[in-house]
Image (cartoon, rainbow, N blue to C red):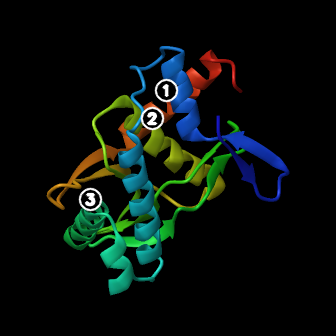
Amino acid sequence: MRYHDIPGYGVSFPAITSLIQLYAEYKLIDTYIPKSNSRATIGTKTSQLLDRILKGGHIDDKEWGTLNLKTRRAVLAALKWQKATGFKPKESESLVYSLRFGIAGHPDTIGIIRPWWICVIDWKIGDINNIRVSLQIPTYGFCYLEMYPRRRIDGFRAVHLDTEKATYQERIIPYEEGEHWFNEFIRMKLQVGIL
């Protein structure tokens, strides 16, 4: 189980993704299918590159040339999605946590989509239509709202980045549905005795 140190509090909380894997081990959700090593490597590298780009950085030609072709396609797919939605990042790879529920994680990004929708976004190389995604992304959002109660979140999005065609597919989870999934996440946390 991975943990995140919570700055200023001297505590560590379990990672949201680790808890979701634990729920699968307890058979509370469908069996967790781990990513292949190559998919995990592509996903991690893609997230790192997109974090840099969203924070105003860039990838120079030399670095771009050294990247795995699938990673390049995933980055291009994300940039196409950003252009199509008008996405403007506000946060990228920031730690979010809930002191109330003792959980923490790093959503890929939080920002604004046209016209003025504030969304929690997570990039995915694999399947986006599963319960793990349903639990993960809204839980990030509700941790963020606990940390910043005067801010708002309008919804949650999983963006699948196709590493073969450099295209994207998005799954939109409306706020109300996200609230349901967050409550399910906490119910399962209680059920496995971690609260």
Q: Residue at x 23, y 73 (%)?
A: 83
Q: Which of marks 2 and 3 is in front?
A: 3
Quadrant location of the C terminus? top right
* Pointer 3 or 1: first along the chain: 3
**Above or below: residue 83 compared with residue 122:** below
- Amino acid at the residue labelled 3: Lys
Question: Which residue in the rendered view is the most extreme toward the right?
Answer: 10
Name the residue beneath numbered marker 1: 184
- What separation in Å lies between label 2 and label 3 (alpha carbons)? 27 Å
- Amino acid at the residue labelled 1: Glu
Q: Is mark 1 on a helix, strand or loop?
A: helix
User: Crowding at label 2, few (<14), some or many (≥20) Cα neighbours within 10 Å?
Assistant: many
Q: Residue at x 35, y 73 (%)?
A: 66
Q: Which residue is drawn at 18% across and 62% down?
A: 166
Quadrant location of the N terminus? top right
Question: Which residue in the rendered view is the most extreme toward the front?
Answer: 66
Q: Which residue is drawn at 48% across and 16% down?
A: 28
Kindly tell me whether residue 86 is visible in this rendering: yes
Query: 145 and 67: which one is in front?
Result: 67
User: Crowding at label 1, few (<14), some or many (≥20) Cα neighbours within 10 Å?
Assistant: some
Residue 60 rendering spot, x and y as whole percentages: 37, 85
Name the residue beneath numbered marker 2: 135
Q: Please say if the residues under marks 2 and 1 sit with CB atoms less than 8 Å apart.
A: yes
Name the residue beneath numbered marker 3: 70
Query: 146 and 7: which one is in front?
Result: 7
Q: Is mark 3 on a helix, strand or loop?
A: helix
